[in-house]
Image (spheres, rainbow, N blue to C red):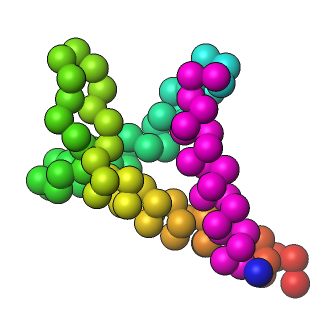
Amino acid sequence: MRWIAVFVLVLVHVALIAAGDALPAALTPAIAGTLYLPLWPLSALGIPVFSPAESGGWASPSLLGWLCFVALWSLLWWLVVALVMRVRS
């Protein structure tokens, strides 16, 4: 049950990122931050988490970047679900 909840939360998170242009302008920076902020330290360590940037634009995450994003947020959502389940019992 816990893994299903984590999977759904990660899917909703990815869907919010995919729908970034359709979201209100006030939410877009916060949602983009959940993608870019965890990847910047990895990029600073030399891990290629960003694709080559187009001139003047934001670099999109590479495949490794997306895998790191999913791994990190899966862990964080798992911790949230575990905490909620512990508090509920």
Occupied quadrant, residue 69: bottom left
Furthest residue toward left: 46
Q: Is residue 4 magenta?
A: yes
Tally of numbered discs: 0
Furthest residue toward bottom: 89
Q: Is residue 50 left or right of residue 24?
A: left
Query: At which x and y percent is residue 65?
Result: 32, 52
Occupied quadrant, residue 18: top right
Residue 80 visible to the viewer: no
Image quarter where the C terminus lies is: bottom right
Image quarter where the N terminus lies is: bottom right
Q: Main secondary structure of the magenta part?
A: helix
Furthest residue toward right: 89
Q: Nearer the viewer, residue 25 or 88?
A: 25
Q: Nearer the viewer, residue 21 or 72?
A: 21
- Identify the residue shown where x is 61% and y is 72%: 78
Query: Considering only vertical position in the picture, is 59 above or below 75?
Result: above
Q: Is residue 39 left or right of residue 9?
A: left
Query: Considering only vertical position in the picture, is 65 above or below 78?
Result: above
Magenta segment, which residues? 2-22
- Identify the residue shown where x is 46% and y is 37%: 33
Q: Is residue 26 magenta?
A: no
Q: Is residue 89 left or right of residue 24?
A: right
Query: At which x and y percent is residue 52?
Result: 17, 35
Query: Considering only vertical position in the picture, is 3 above or below 80?
Result: below
Occupied quadrant, residue 59: top left
- Identify the residue shown where x is 61% and y is 44%: 15
Query: At which x and y percent is residue 13?
Result: 61, 49
- Identify the residue shown where x is 18% and y is 17%: 55
Query: Considering only vertical position in the picture, is 55 above or below 58?
Result: above
Residue 22 visible to the viewer: yes
Q: Nearer the viewer, residue 56 or 87?
A: 56
